[in-house]
Image (cartoon, grey):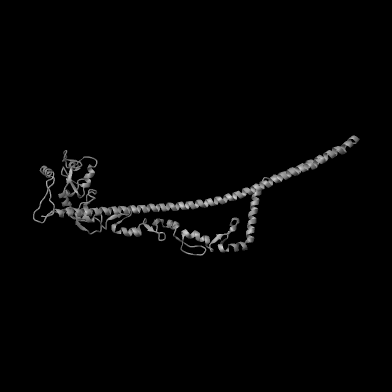
Amino acid sequence: MAAQEPSPPSSLEGNKPGFPKKILANNLEDKHLCNSCHKILRRPLQAQCGHRFCSFCFNKIVSSGPQKCSACIKEDLFEEPTSILKQGGAFPDNAARREVEALAAVCPNEGCTWAGTIKEFEASHEGNCDFMIILCPSCKELMRANEQERHNERECPERTLHCKYCKEPFLLKNIKAHDEICPKYPMICEGCAKKKIPREKYVDHIKFCSKFKAPCRFHVVGCDTSVEKEKIHEHERQCSYEHLNLLLHFIMGIKVSLESLQPQSLEVASHKLQELHQSLRDLELKMSQVGGGGAAPVQGACAPTIATSFTPLPSAMGAALELQLQSEKTKVAELNRRCQELELKVSTFENIVCVLNREMEHSCTTMEAYNRQHRLDQDKIEILNNKVRQLERTVSLRDLSIVEMDGKMREMSAATYDGIFVWKISDFTKKRQDAVAGRAPAMFSPGFS
């Protein structure tokens, strides 16, 4: 009689709790349930107290040290040390495992018509059902496994697309942002109407495009006309009067501004000069009164002398005042010159500030583009990580198949066809003691025919 073919070993054994109860096609018996998770036994282990546990559940219980068997306590059968669960204190219950794996099962996923045994469910259908509900890793939406490909390609709002111009990947929600920075995005020249100019070559194109409209060189003084580059000289020739008029208004405005900034030195100097002339006239009048009022000869003789000594005063003081006036005029001219220099420097600094502002705006735009590209790179890395995890799962399944084939090869190499079956039992003394003590009541031979 040939022994039953064992269930395929798995590299993932012990990593899952029991099977859900709803996969059974027939009535469920309590002996098939794990005493921890209360689901159908998966890779059952039998403790010394006789209770069965899933391999995953037992290892989880004893991972923090020896524990009391909850089933023994519940059934009021607790006794030490038998009811103490610990590492190495349980053995694989192959009889219970074969019994469970032979039970009829159906797929618990709605809409799936698969039917078979629990062994077949675990080996080929569990985790591979097309009707299994899965979670989209990008948008977290629930869907069936057979709808995942369509969801990823057409429906997922977080799906990754590839630019048809530069071939770079980006998220659907970032499509507008990518179009703004895509170096291959086709542009249309506003001058010559040429189409499909890559963005990276657009600046070079408009530098040499004769049809591209550029602002007039007199836009700084008020000309707001945009002219094609090939017609700029014609525009300047035709509008020379308007340009001169704009320049005149601009210069007059500068002059008014400078006059509002100049000190009123000239007016003050003129006012002082008038006051001095008035004082001189009053002094001359007094001196004439003093000279004409006396009758004595001495006084008469003295009068001309006095008058002669005071006559040059008005001219000398006038010359001094003229020199002071010239000095004030020189100061005013110097102030005017310095104001003009300051105005020129202010204009230069304003141009520098404008250039720096444009550079700052360009830097901000570039930084924002880099940030968007960084987010795209992060999303791409996450996609690659997901692919790596999928490949790891595929490798694990391959390992499972290889180990299964290796087991079958060992069984085939142990089989004989000459009518004589030799069953070599390793560690016979220990296994005999376990059988006598009742810890391992049964053993099963390898397959033979």
Q: Is residue 369 above or below residue 293?
A: below
Q: Quadrant of the C terminus?
A: bottom left
Q: In front: 404, or 12? A: 404
Q: Quadrant of the N terminus?
A: bottom left
Q: Is residue 24 visible?
A: no
188 on left or right of 127: right
Q: Is residue 248 above or below residue 307?
A: below
Q: Residue at x 19, y 53 (%)?
A: 406
258 on left or right of 275: left
Q: Residue at x 42, y 53 (%)?
A: 372
Q: In front: 87, or 407? A: 407
Q: Is residue 236 visible?
A: yes
Question: In the image, residue 85 lies at what x, y percent?
Answer: 19, 41
Question: In the image, residue 50 lies at what x, y percent?
Answer: 15, 44
Q: Residue at x 71, y 44 (%)?
A: 328
Q: In front: 61, or 309? A: 309
Q: Residue extending furthest left?
A: 419
Residue 440 picture quarter: top left
